[in-house]
Amino acid sequence: MTYPDPTVAAIVGEHFVPLMVNIRQQPDLLQRYQAFWTPSVCVIAQDGTLVYRNEGWMPAPEFATMLILARGYYFYRRKRHNQAALVFNEMVTRYPRSPFAPEAQYMLGVCIYLSTGSSEEQEEAWRMLLQWYPASLWATKARGI
C-alpha cells in the first residue's frame, strides 16, 4: 500500500483531502471522472473540476512525486502560474530522478512563460529539460515548439 508510506502520508496530509470511492457503489463518479481502471487517483478542485488523473498502482516514491506533480497541475489549471511554477520547480529539484520529473520540468517552462511572458526564461527551463531528460517524451514536445 502506498498511503501508509511516511512521505506519501505527509504530502497527502499537507495538501490533499483523501477520499476512497467504491465505483460499484457510486457509478456516477466513475462516469464523471472517467475513472475506468483501479486504482485511479483523481485530484479534484473544490468545485468538482478534475485537475489531474492517474491510473494504476505505483510504488510509494513514484506515488509521492506524482502527488507533487498533481499539486502543480492544480495551480496551473487554476491559472495560478507562479504557484504552479514553484511546485514544479520543487518537484524537479527534490526528485530529479522521478519518472515525473521531465513532465514537471516541461510544465515549469510553461508556467514561467504564462506568469512572466518571458520566452527566454521558458526556453531556459526547456534547455534544462533537453539536457537532463533528452530521451523523454517531454523533451520531444519541447523540441517541437
Image (cartoon, rainbow, N blue to C red):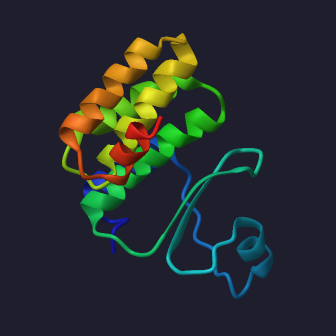
In the rendered image, residue 56, in percent from the top left (x then y), is placed at 44, 75
Which quadrant is the N terminus positioned in? bottom left
Up the image or down, 130 lies above or below 48; here it is above
Describe residue 66's horizontal placement relative to residue 29 as left or right: left
Q: Quadrant of residue 76?
A: top right
In the rendered image, residue 39, in percent from the top left (x then y), is placed at 50, 76
Q: Residue at x 28, y 55 (%)?
A: 99
Q: In the image shown, does 25 or 34 lie closer to the viewer?
A: 34
Q: In the image shown, does 11 or 75 lie closer to the viewer?
A: 75
In the rendered image, residue 88, in percent from the top left (x then y), is placed at 39, 34
Q: Residue at x 67, y 46 (%)?
A: 45
Q: Which residue reaches farthest bottom?
A: 24
Q: Which residue reaches farthest right?
A: 28
Q: Quadrant of residue 96?
A: top left
Q: In the image shown, does 118 or 68 lie closer to the viewer?
A: 118
Q: Residue at x 54, y 59 (%)?
A: 18
In the rendered image, residue 70, in percent from the top left (x then y), is placed at 49, 48
Q: Residue at x 76, y 74 (%)?
A: 31
Describe residue 24's horizontal placement relative to residue 85 as left or right: right
Describe residue 12's horizontal placement relative to residue 52 as left or right: left
Question: What is the total number of numbered labels drawn onto the structure image?
Answer: 0
